[in-house]
Protein backbone atom coordinates (compact mmCIF):
# COMPACT_ATOMS: atom_id res chain seq x y z
CA UNK A 1 0.00 0.00 0.00
CA UNK A 2 2.72 2.43 0.93
CA UNK A 3 4.55 1.74 -2.31
CA UNK A 4 1.36 2.46 -4.28
CA UNK A 5 0.85 5.71 -2.42
CA UNK A 6 4.44 6.67 -3.03
CA UNK A 7 4.00 5.84 -6.68
CA UNK A 8 0.93 7.99 -6.97
CA UNK A 9 2.66 10.86 -5.24
CA UNK A 10 5.60 10.42 -7.58
CA UNK A 11 3.27 10.48 -10.58
CA UNK A 12 1.65 13.68 -9.35
CA UNK A 13 5.06 15.23 -8.75
CA UNK A 14 6.27 14.26 -12.20
CA UNK A 15 3.12 15.71 -13.76
CA UNK A 16 3.58 18.96 -11.83
CA UNK A 17 7.23 19.20 -12.84
CA UNK A 18 6.20 18.68 -16.46
CA UNK A 19 3.73 21.54 -16.17
CA UNK A 20 6.28 23.81 -14.50
CA UNK A 21 8.75 23.17 -17.33
CA UNK A 22 6.24 24.60 -19.80
CA UNK A 23 5.47 27.81 -17.93
CA UNK A 24 6.73 31.26 -18.82
CA UNK A 25 7.28 34.24 -16.55
CA UNK A 26 4.12 35.78 -17.96
CA UNK A 27 2.16 32.65 -17.07
CA UNK A 28 3.20 33.27 -13.48
CA UNK A 29 1.85 36.80 -13.73
CA UNK A 30 -1.49 35.47 -15.01
CA UNK A 31 -1.78 32.98 -12.15
CA UNK A 32 -0.92 35.67 -9.60
CA UNK A 33 -3.55 37.99 -11.08
CA UNK A 34 -6.22 35.31 -10.88
CA UNK A 35 -5.35 34.56 -7.28
CA UNK A 36 -5.53 38.25 -6.39
CA UNK A 37 -8.70 39.17 -8.29
CA UNK A 38 -10.43 35.76 -8.31
CA UNK A 39 -11.98 36.24 -11.76
CA UNK A 40 -10.84 38.01 -14.93
CA UNK A 41 -12.06 37.96 -18.53
CA UNK A 42 -9.99 37.43 -21.66
CA UNK A 43 -9.91 41.16 -22.59
CA UNK A 44 -9.00 42.09 -19.01
CA UNK A 45 -6.13 39.62 -18.92
CA UNK A 46 -5.02 40.85 -22.33
CA UNK A 47 -4.61 44.37 -20.90
CA UNK A 48 -3.14 43.26 -17.59
CA UNK A 49 -0.64 40.67 -18.79
CA UNK A 50 -0.38 40.61 -22.61
CA UNK A 51 0.20 44.28 -23.55
CA UNK A 52 -3.32 44.56 -24.91
CA UNK A 53 -3.06 41.69 -27.40
CA UNK A 54 -6.30 39.71 -27.18
CA UNK A 55 -5.10 37.20 -29.77
CA UNK A 56 -1.94 36.35 -27.82
CA UNK A 57 -3.94 36.21 -24.60
CA UNK A 58 -6.46 33.77 -26.09
CA UNK A 59 -3.77 31.41 -27.30
CA UNK A 60 -1.83 31.35 -24.04
CA UNK A 61 -4.92 31.12 -21.86
CA UNK A 62 -6.01 28.15 -23.95
CA UNK A 63 -2.73 26.44 -23.10
CA UNK A 64 -3.05 27.22 -19.39
CA UNK A 65 -6.58 25.79 -19.48
CA UNK A 66 -5.38 22.61 -21.17
CA UNK A 67 -2.66 22.26 -18.51
CA UNK A 68 -5.30 22.44 -15.79
CA UNK A 69 -3.87 25.61 -14.26
CA UNK A 70 -6.96 27.74 -14.90
CA UNK A 71 -10.57 27.00 -15.70
CA UNK A 72 -13.03 29.12 -17.62
CA UNK A 73 -16.71 29.64 -18.23
CA UNK A 74 -19.09 31.90 -20.10
CA UNK A 75 -21.96 33.28 -18.01
CA UNK A 76 -25.52 32.78 -19.26
CA UNK A 77 -26.54 35.41 -21.79
CA UNK A 78 -29.15 38.00 -20.95
CA UNK A 79 -31.85 38.74 -23.51
CA UNK A 80 -30.50 40.81 -26.39
CA UNK A 81 -26.85 40.18 -25.55
CA UNK A 82 -24.28 38.89 -27.98
CA UNK A 83 -21.50 36.51 -27.03
CA UNK A 84 -19.58 37.02 -23.82
CA UNK A 85 -15.84 36.51 -23.36
CA UNK A 86 -14.46 33.65 -21.35
CA UNK A 87 -14.21 34.32 -17.62
CA UNK A 88 -11.14 32.72 -16.02
CA UNK A 89 -10.50 31.55 -12.46
CA UNK A 90 -7.53 29.80 -10.91
CA UNK A 91 -7.78 26.00 -10.82
CA UNK A 92 -6.37 23.69 -8.16
CA UNK A 93 -3.19 22.89 -10.05
CA UNK A 94 -2.65 26.60 -10.70
CA UNK A 95 -2.95 27.30 -6.97
CA UNK A 96 -0.33 24.61 -6.28
CA UNK A 97 2.01 26.30 -8.78
CA UNK A 98 1.48 29.74 -7.18
CA UNK A 99 2.13 28.30 -3.73
CA UNK A 100 5.28 26.54 -4.93
CA UNK A 101 6.61 29.73 -6.51
CA UNK A 102 5.96 31.60 -3.26
CA UNK A 103 7.31 28.75 -1.12
CA UNK A 104 4.15 28.56 1.00
CA UNK A 105 1.46 25.96 1.59
CA UNK A 106 -1.61 26.20 -0.64
CA UNK A 107 -3.88 26.75 2.36
CA UNK A 108 -1.98 29.98 3.08
CA UNK A 109 -3.16 31.50 -0.21
CA UNK A 110 -6.80 31.97 0.79
CA UNK A 111 -7.76 30.08 -2.37
CA UNK A 112 -11.05 28.21 -2.71
CA UNK A 113 -11.89 26.77 -6.14
CA UNK A 114 -15.60 26.29 -5.38
CA UNK A 115 -15.94 29.86 -4.15
CA UNK A 116 -14.37 31.19 -7.33
CA UNK A 117 -16.51 29.05 -9.61
CA UNK A 118 -19.63 30.11 -7.69
CA UNK A 119 -19.08 33.60 -9.10
CA UNK A 120 -20.48 32.27 -12.39
CA UNK A 121 -23.98 32.33 -10.88
CA UNK A 122 -23.48 35.19 -8.44
CA UNK A 123 -25.82 38.20 -8.74
CA UNK A 124 -22.68 40.31 -8.22
CA UNK A 125 -20.85 38.90 -11.25
CA UNK A 126 -21.55 41.86 -13.54
CA UNK A 127 -20.49 44.28 -10.80
CA UNK A 128 -17.22 42.42 -10.19
CA UNK A 129 -16.46 42.25 -13.91
CA UNK A 130 -17.22 45.97 -14.24
CA UNK A 131 -14.76 46.88 -11.50
CA UNK A 132 -12.10 44.75 -13.17
CA UNK A 133 -12.88 46.50 -16.47
CA UNK A 134 -11.85 49.78 -14.79
CA UNK A 135 -8.67 48.15 -13.47
CA UNK A 136 -7.74 46.81 -16.90
CA UNK A 137 -8.58 50.11 -18.58
CA UNK A 138 -6.31 51.99 -16.17
CA UNK A 139 -3.44 49.69 -17.10
CA UNK A 140 -4.25 50.22 -20.78
CA UNK A 141 -4.33 53.99 -20.20
CA UNK A 142 -0.88 53.87 -18.66
CA UNK A 143 0.44 51.88 -21.61
CA UNK A 144 -1.00 54.22 -24.24
CA UNK A 145 -0.41 57.68 -22.75
CA UNK A 146 2.05 57.35 -19.89
CA UNK A 147 1.26 57.31 -16.22
CA UNK A 148 1.31 54.24 -14.04
CA UNK A 149 -1.11 52.37 -11.82
CA UNK A 150 1.21 51.99 -8.85
CA UNK A 151 -1.17 49.96 -6.71
CA UNK A 152 -4.70 48.61 -6.63
CA UNK A 153 -6.68 47.03 -3.83
CA UNK A 154 -10.03 45.32 -4.27
CA UNK A 155 -12.99 45.26 -1.93
CA UNK A 156 -12.47 41.70 -0.76
CA UNK A 157 -9.44 42.81 1.30
CA UNK A 158 -11.14 45.61 3.22
CA UNK A 159 -11.33 43.58 6.43
CA UNK A 160 -7.66 44.42 6.99
CA UNK A 161 -8.34 48.16 6.89
CA UNK A 162 -9.20 50.23 9.95
CA UNK A 163 -11.30 52.59 7.82
CA UNK A 164 -13.67 49.82 6.64
CA UNK A 165 -15.90 50.81 9.55
CA UNK A 166 -16.96 53.90 7.62
CA UNK A 167 -16.59 53.22 3.88
CA UNK A 168 -16.76 50.24 1.54
CA UNK A 169 -15.46 51.38 -1.87
CA UNK A 170 -15.35 48.99 -4.78
CA UNK A 171 -11.59 49.54 -5.04
CA UNK A 172 -8.87 51.99 -4.21
CA UNK A 173 -5.71 52.76 -6.08
CA UNK A 174 -2.61 54.86 -6.47
CA UNK A 175 -1.88 56.57 -9.79
CA UNK A 176 1.38 58.22 -10.84
CA UNK A 177 1.75 60.59 -13.76
CA UNK A 178 4.51 63.09 -14.53
CA UNK A 179 5.45 64.53 -11.12
CA UNK A 180 2.13 63.64 -9.49
CA UNK A 181 1.27 60.59 -7.43
CA UNK A 182 -2.01 60.30 -5.59
CA UNK A 183 -4.59 57.90 -4.21
CA UNK A 184 -8.27 57.51 -5.01
CA UNK A 185 -11.36 55.59 -3.94
CA UNK A 186 -13.47 54.03 -6.69
CA UNK A 187 -17.25 53.62 -6.67
CA UNK A 188 -18.46 51.61 -9.67
CA UNK A 189 -22.09 52.20 -10.67
CA UNK A 190 -24.30 49.86 -12.70
CA UNK A 191 -27.39 52.07 -12.56
CA UNK A 192 -29.18 49.94 -9.97
CA UNK A 193 -29.29 52.53 -7.16
CA UNK A 194 -31.06 55.88 -6.96
CA UNK A 195 -28.81 58.99 -7.09
CA UNK A 196 -29.79 59.75 -3.50
CA UNK A 197 -28.39 56.38 -2.43
CA UNK A 198 -25.12 57.11 -4.22
CA UNK A 199 -24.93 60.50 -2.51
CA UNK A 200 -25.56 58.91 0.88
CA UNK A 201 -22.35 56.91 0.45
CA UNK A 202 -20.42 60.17 0.80
CA UNK A 203 -21.56 60.45 4.42
CA UNK A 204 -19.25 57.56 5.28
CA UNK A 205 -16.32 59.30 3.59
CA UNK A 206 -17.05 62.46 5.60
CA UNK A 207 -17.05 60.40 8.81
CA UNK A 208 -13.77 58.84 7.74
CA UNK A 209 -12.33 62.32 7.12
CA UNK A 210 -13.42 63.47 10.57
CA UNK A 211 -11.67 60.52 12.22
CA UNK A 212 -8.55 60.91 10.05
CA UNK A 213 -7.83 64.63 10.54
CA UNK A 214 -6.54 64.29 14.14
CA UNK A 215 -4.00 61.80 12.82
CA UNK A 216 -2.90 64.16 10.05
CA UNK A 217 -4.38 61.98 7.28
CA UNK A 218 -6.45 63.15 4.31
CA UNK A 219 -9.20 61.34 2.44
CA UNK A 220 -8.40 60.86 -1.27
CA UNK A 221 -10.92 61.86 -3.96
CA UNK A 222 -13.91 59.59 -4.47
CA UNK A 223 -14.32 58.65 -8.14
CA UNK A 224 -17.69 57.48 -9.49
CA UNK A 225 -17.52 55.48 -12.73
CA UNK A 226 -20.79 55.25 -14.69
CA UNK A 227 -21.88 53.06 -17.59
CA UNK A 228 -23.08 55.98 -19.72
CA UNK A 229 -23.31 59.78 -19.76
CA UNK A 230 -27.05 59.88 -19.17
CA UNK A 231 -26.69 57.96 -15.92
CA UNK A 232 -23.72 60.12 -14.95
CA UNK A 233 -25.69 63.33 -15.55
CA UNK A 234 -28.66 62.07 -13.55
CA UNK A 235 -26.46 61.36 -10.54
CA UNK A 236 -24.24 64.43 -10.62
CA UNK A 237 -26.63 66.87 -8.94
CA UNK A 238 -27.23 64.72 -5.86
CA UNK A 239 -23.53 63.91 -5.62
CA UNK A 240 -22.51 67.56 -6.04
CA UNK A 241 -24.85 68.75 -3.28
CA UNK A 242 -23.58 66.07 -0.89
CA UNK A 243 -19.92 66.63 -1.80
CA UNK A 244 -20.23 70.38 -1.18
CA UNK A 245 -22.03 69.92 2.13
CA UNK A 246 -19.60 67.29 3.40
CA UNK A 247 -16.39 68.75 2.02
CA UNK A 248 -15.44 65.66 0.02
CA UNK A 249 -13.63 65.78 -3.34
CA UNK A 250 -15.80 63.85 -5.83
CA UNK A 251 -15.37 63.29 -9.56
CA UNK A 252 -17.46 61.44 -12.12
CA UNK A 253 -16.81 59.84 -15.49
CA UNK A 254 -18.68 57.65 -17.99
CA UNK A 255 -17.23 54.62 -19.76
CA UNK A 256 -18.10 55.65 -23.37
CA UNK A 257 -15.95 58.78 -23.00
CA UNK A 258 -12.69 56.83 -22.85
CA UNK A 259 -10.36 55.07 -20.47
CA UNK A 260 -10.14 56.20 -16.84
CA UNK A 261 -6.61 57.56 -17.22
CA UNK A 262 -7.76 59.91 -19.99
CA UNK A 263 -9.64 63.24 -19.99
CA UNK A 264 -12.98 61.79 -18.85
CA UNK A 265 -13.31 63.15 -15.28
CA UNK A 266 -15.45 66.03 -14.06
CA UNK A 267 -14.70 67.29 -10.55
CA UNK A 268 -18.00 68.26 -8.97
CA UNK A 269 -18.12 71.84 -7.77
CA UNK A 270 -15.21 72.84 -10.04
CA UNK A 271 -15.03 73.81 -13.72
CA UNK A 272 -17.08 71.51 -15.94
CA UNK A 273 -14.12 70.59 -18.13
CA UNK A 274 -13.13 66.94 -18.53
CA UNK A 275 -9.65 66.33 -17.16
CA UNK A 276 -7.29 63.36 -16.93
CA UNK A 277 -6.80 61.33 -13.78
CA UNK A 278 -3.32 62.81 -13.42
CA UNK A 279 -4.72 66.36 -13.62
CA UNK A 280 -7.47 65.48 -11.16
CA UNK A 281 -4.97 64.18 -8.61
CA UNK A 282 -2.66 67.17 -9.18
CA UNK A 283 -5.49 69.52 -8.24
CA UNK A 284 -7.41 67.54 -5.65
CA UNK A 285 -5.40 64.46 -4.75
CA UNK A 286 -3.25 63.35 -1.87
CA UNK A 287 -0.73 60.55 -1.44
CA UNK A 288 -2.63 59.49 1.65
CA UNK A 289 -1.12 57.48 4.45
CA UNK A 290 -4.70 56.35 4.95
CA UNK A 291 -4.42 53.72 2.20
CA UNK A 292 -1.92 51.00 3.00
CA UNK A 293 -1.46 49.93 -0.60
CA UNK A 294 1.08 47.34 -1.65
CA UNK A 295 3.55 48.97 -4.03
Image (cartoon, rainbow, N blue to C red):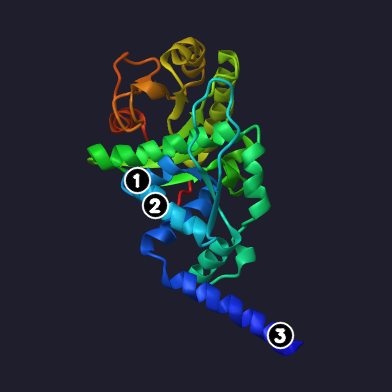
The quarter of the image holding the N terminus is bottom right
The residue that mark 1 highlights is: 55
Q: Position of residue 84 (x, y in %)?
A: 50, 34
Residue 180 in view (yes/no): no
Give 198 or 134, whichever is nearer the viewer.
134
Q: Position of residue 178 (x, y in %)?
A: 22, 40
Cα–Cα gap, marks 3 and 1: 44 Å
Residue, far bottom: 3
Cα–Cα gap, marks 2 and 3: 37 Å
Disc 2 element: helix
Marks 1 & 2, CB-CB < 8 Å contact: yes
Disc 1 element: helix
Quarter assignment of residue 73:
top right
Q: Which mark is residue 16?
A: none
Task: First in sequence, mark 3 or 1: give its number.
Answer: 3
Residue 208 in view (yes/no): yes
Marks 2 & 3, CB-CB < 8 Å contact: no
Mark 2, other Cα within 10 Å: few <14 / some 14–19 / many ≥20: few
The residue that mark 3 highlights is: 4
Q: Position of residue 132 (x, y in %)?
A: 47, 38
Mark 1, other Cα within 10 Å: few <14 / some 14–19 / many ≥20: few
Give 203 or 295, whichever is nearer the viewer.
295
Give 247 or 59, whichever is nearer the viewer.
59
Residue that appears at 59% across and 61% down: 109
Quarter assignment of residue 228:
top left
Cα–Cα gap, marks 1 and 2: 6 Å
The residue that mark 2 highlights is: 59
Amino acid sequence: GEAVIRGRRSDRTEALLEVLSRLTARDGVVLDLLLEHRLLTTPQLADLAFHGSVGVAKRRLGILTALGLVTRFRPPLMRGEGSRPFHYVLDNRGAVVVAARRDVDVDKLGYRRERNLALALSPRLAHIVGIHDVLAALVASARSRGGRLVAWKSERTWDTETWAEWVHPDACGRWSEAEVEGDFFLEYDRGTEAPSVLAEKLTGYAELAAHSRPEGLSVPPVLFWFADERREASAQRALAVAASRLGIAVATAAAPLGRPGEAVWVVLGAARERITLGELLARHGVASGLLRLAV
